[in-house]
């Protein structure tokens, strides 16, 4: 029974004294509310006791005045519960002063009601803060002083309004004196308690501040602004500067701890702080007590305390970071040197290999165009296939290097995706059928529109996937599908899929096959050959299109490679009802061409093709000879190798351009490097063709340069 009663009383206590509190209220505001509720409680208790006393002595007017005063205290309490603390305080203060004035006038000053002004002025220190509410406190004091003056001038010594008061003045005075003393003691105790709590809080805050100061990861120094003497530092600063204690650094000049070359920078920083701003951040180099260099990220803030100017200097030790940064820079420089060496090596090797392959591929193309014995056909096919396969390997290695170095960018141009897919299907259906495979095609008619895409890179991806599918399928089928999964007014989502019934890939190997130079196993490499670069290149190119190349495969049951990309729609395309039939090659008869090439094999192959097209070819074995022949002859076109003895192709063209600025010039080169097209254009060339060249491409480029349109 005791426990429920205690809980009920505790609940009533908390409800009364915590009225007006709410979530998010600051600690200072909470204290103000609780103190105000305490004041109201004591005032109501005093009113109740006074009412009981007055009724017992038949002083009904005084009892009525106390009851009215209690009512206004309850109004103030209600205002506080509605979060109107300032209004509640003013109501309670005015109510208390009016009560004392009125009760003094009714009873007379001999009753001693004015004695309550002493605890009243004492309670003001609890209710109103001088620091935060100075004007309000001044106003309340003015009300109190005015009320005292009114009591003195308006209150009679005795008042006979109440019939039974005449013989009670001594008792009333003693009672009011005791009550005033009791309230004064209570409020004094409360003030002492509050001050003690403040002192404890201040000491705790100081201790907490010291903990933060000494457990900071930064070294902190307090420095006199005028003399730059260190007045104090935290424990972290002692550790950072390898000191035994704080005394070894206090009263020393802060610039003496800086590395010599940084002292001037520090002094300039101090001057900037004095004139322009009050804080600075940057890096400085210090020396510790034992002579070790300490890289510090420093922040300096100026402040004043008791009219003395100080700097607070925070030092974060970043020595390890600087060492790591230095190592990273060294590693980066080494990597860049290695990358440049690798690029030069691949460029040189590419040039040499392409030069030789140009001769092999060119010779095989010439032999296949000439009359040959039927028994020679298989050998010629092997020669052409092997040389073109080797060229593919060279191109794959170069592509992998460029992609890994981030030097490949997509060249997005309008293209009819339906036409592209159909041409691709026709090309690979012939290859598949020659191997005895069924080639299945599914091309979505919704793709008969122009989309913005890099045709060359997309063709490279599809070619790699279809070539692999045909290569790794002995019997069965290979399928190629191109679907439009969704289309908006601006973009189309397209899925490409290549399936086969080939050897498949084991689940454990499906991630590895997308890595450079990786294949499913050694047996696959021995049987089918290849470098293992095709899928790695395709995966990275698909990622450049913001897609993901995925595989679904089961060993011995075939594979499915697919990816989905989102492409922009070209709204300016023309939809032709009938495709133009490919034109036949137009004759180049009568075209005068100056061919500069130092390799006699490449010269012979290029000459044979050009002469078959009716081109009048003049030959030069180096740039100087080409310049001399140009001065003597009249030419329609220049075909110039870049790397030649005595004078290279670029220098030769620069000299020729001084004589004729408009003659078309094409670079004839095996070199491959970044931004090649832009570089050659800047050097005066109108176009370029790689060695080994495709005869159709060379013919087309010549016609384009001579007529301004592709044939």
Image (spheres, rainbow, N blue to C red):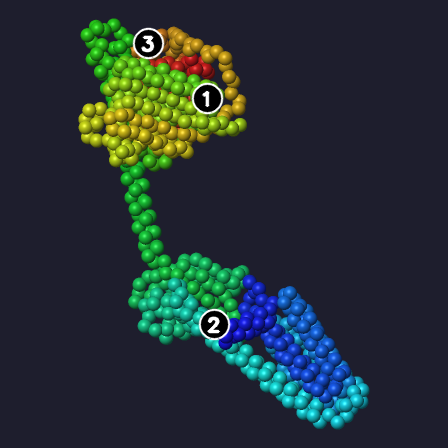
State which tag comes first along the sequence, 1 or 3: 1
Nearer mark to the viewer, of 3 and 2: 2
Q: Secondary structure at mark 3?
A: helix
* Residue nearest the observer in this picture, 180 or 325: 180
Q: Note whether 123 is above or below 525 in the view shown.
A: below
- Left or right? Give the position of 183 relative to 650: right
Q: Secondary structure at mark 1?
A: helix
Who's the residue at 68% across and 83% down the image?
A: 52
Task: Give neighbour class at mark 2: few <14, some 14-19, many 20+ (Cα, 10 Å).
Answer: few
- Left or right? Give the position of 485 relative to 387: right
Who's the residue at 80% across and 87% down the image?
A: 161
Q: CA distance from mark 1 to mark 3?
A: 43 Å
Circles 3 and 2, Cβ within 8 Å, touching? The answer is: no
Q: Secondary structure at mark 2?
A: helix
Q: Quadrant of residue 625?
A: top left
Residue found at the very far front of the displayed protein: 1
Who's the residue at 23% across and 13% down the image?
A: 380
Which quadrant would the C terminus be assigned to in this image? top left
Who's the residue at 50% across and 66% down the image?
A: 302
Residue on which the image places disc 2: 205
Residue on which the image places disc 1: 447
Q: Position of residue 294 (x, y in %)?
A: 34, 61
Residue on which the image places disc 3: 611
Q: Position of residue 185 (x, y in %)?
A: 59, 86
Q: Position of residue 287 (x, y in %)?
A: 34, 64
State which tag comes first along the sequence, 1 or 2: 2
Q: Position of residue 689 (x, y in %)?
A: 35, 21
* Residue nearest the observer in this picture, 636 or 708: 708
């Amino acid at each position: 029974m005791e426990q429920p009663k205690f809980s009920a009383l505790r609940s009533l206590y908390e409800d009364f004294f915590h009225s007006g509190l709410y979530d998010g209220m600051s600690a200072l505001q909470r204290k103000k509310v609780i103190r105000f509720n305490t004041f109201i409680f004591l005032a109501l208790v005093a009113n109740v006791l006074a009412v009981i006393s007055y009724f017992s002595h038949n002083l009904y007017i005084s009892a009525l005045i106390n009851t009215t005063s209690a009512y206004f205290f309850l109004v103030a309490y209600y205002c506080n519960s509605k979060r109107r603390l300032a209004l509640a305080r003013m109501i309670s203060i005015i109510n208390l002063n009016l009560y004392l004035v009125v009760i003094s006038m009714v009873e007379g000053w001999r009753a001693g009601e004015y004695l309550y002004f002493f605890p009243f002025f004492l309670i003001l220190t609890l209710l109103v803060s001088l620091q935060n509410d100075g004007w309000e406190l001044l106003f309340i004091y003015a009300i109190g002083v005015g009320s005292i003056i009114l009591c003195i001038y308006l209150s009679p010594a005795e008042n006979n309004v109440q019939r039974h008061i005449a013989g009670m003045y001594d008792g009333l005075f003693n009672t009011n004196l005791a009550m005033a003393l009791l309230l004064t003691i209570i409020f004094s105790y409360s003030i002492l308690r509050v001050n003690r709590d403040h002192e404890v809080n201040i000491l705790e805050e100081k201790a907490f501040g010291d903990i933060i100061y000494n457990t900071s990861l930064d070294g902190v120094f307090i420095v006199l602004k005028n003399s730059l003497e260190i007045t104090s530092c935290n424990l972290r600063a002692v550790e950072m500067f390898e000191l035994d204690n704080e005394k070894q650094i206090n009263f020393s000049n802060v610039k003496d701890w800086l590395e010599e070359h940084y002292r001037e920078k520090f002094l300039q920083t101090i001057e900037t702080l004095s004139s322009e701003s009050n804080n600075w951040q940057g890096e400085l180099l210090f020396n510790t007590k034992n002579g070790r260099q300490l890289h510090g990220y420093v922040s300096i803030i100026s402040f004043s305390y008791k009219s003395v100017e100080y700097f607070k200097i925070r030092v974060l030790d970043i020595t390890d970071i600087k060492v790591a940064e230095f190592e990273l820079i060294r590693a980066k420089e080494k990597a860049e040197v290695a990358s440049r060496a690798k690029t030069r090596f691949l460029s040189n090797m590419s040039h040499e290999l392409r030069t030789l392959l140009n001769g092999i591929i060119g010779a095989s193309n010439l032999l296949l165009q000439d009359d040959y014995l039927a028994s020679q056909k298989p050998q010629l096919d092997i020669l052409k296939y092997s040389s073109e396969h080797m060229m593919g390997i060279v191109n794959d290695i170069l592509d992998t290097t460029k992609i890994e170095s981030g030097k490949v960018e997509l060249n997005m141009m309008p293209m009819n995706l339906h036409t592209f897919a159909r041409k691709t299907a026709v090309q690979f259906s012939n290859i598949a059928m020659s191997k005895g495979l069924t080639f299945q095609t599914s091309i979505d008619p919704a793709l008969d529109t122009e989309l913005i895409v890099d045709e060359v890179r997309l063709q490279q991806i599809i070619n790699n996937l279809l070539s692999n599918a045909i290569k790794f399928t002995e019997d069965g089928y290979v399928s190629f599908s191109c679907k439009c999964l969704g289309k908006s007014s601006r973009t189309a989502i397209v899925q490409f899929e290549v399936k086969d019934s080939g050897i498949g890939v084991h689940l454990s190997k499906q991630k590895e096959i997308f890595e450079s130079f990786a294949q499913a196993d050694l047996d696959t490499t021995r049987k089918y050959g290849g470098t293992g670069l095709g899928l790695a290149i395709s995966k990275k190119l698909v990622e450049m299109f913001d897609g993901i190349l995925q595989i679904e495969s089961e060993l011995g049951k075939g594979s499915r490679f697919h990816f989905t990309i989102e492409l922009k729609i070209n709204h300016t395309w023309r939809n032709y009802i009938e495709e133009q039939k490919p034109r036949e090659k137009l004759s180049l008869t009568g075209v005068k061409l100056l061919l500069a090439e130092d390799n006699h094999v490449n010269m012979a192959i290029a000459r044979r093709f050009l002469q078959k097209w009716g081109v009048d070819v003049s030959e030069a074995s180096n740039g100087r000879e080409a310049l001399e022949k140009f001065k003597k002859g009249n030419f329609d076109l220049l075909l110039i190798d870049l790397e030649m003895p005595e004078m290279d192709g670029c220098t030769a063209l620069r000299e020729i351009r001084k004589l004729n600025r408009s003659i078309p010039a094409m670079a004839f080169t095996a070199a491959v490097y970044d931004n090649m097209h832009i570089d050659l254009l800047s050097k005066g060339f109108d176009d370029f063709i790689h060695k080994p060249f495709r005869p159709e491409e060379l013919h087309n480029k010549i016609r384009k340069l001579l007529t301004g349109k592709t044939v």
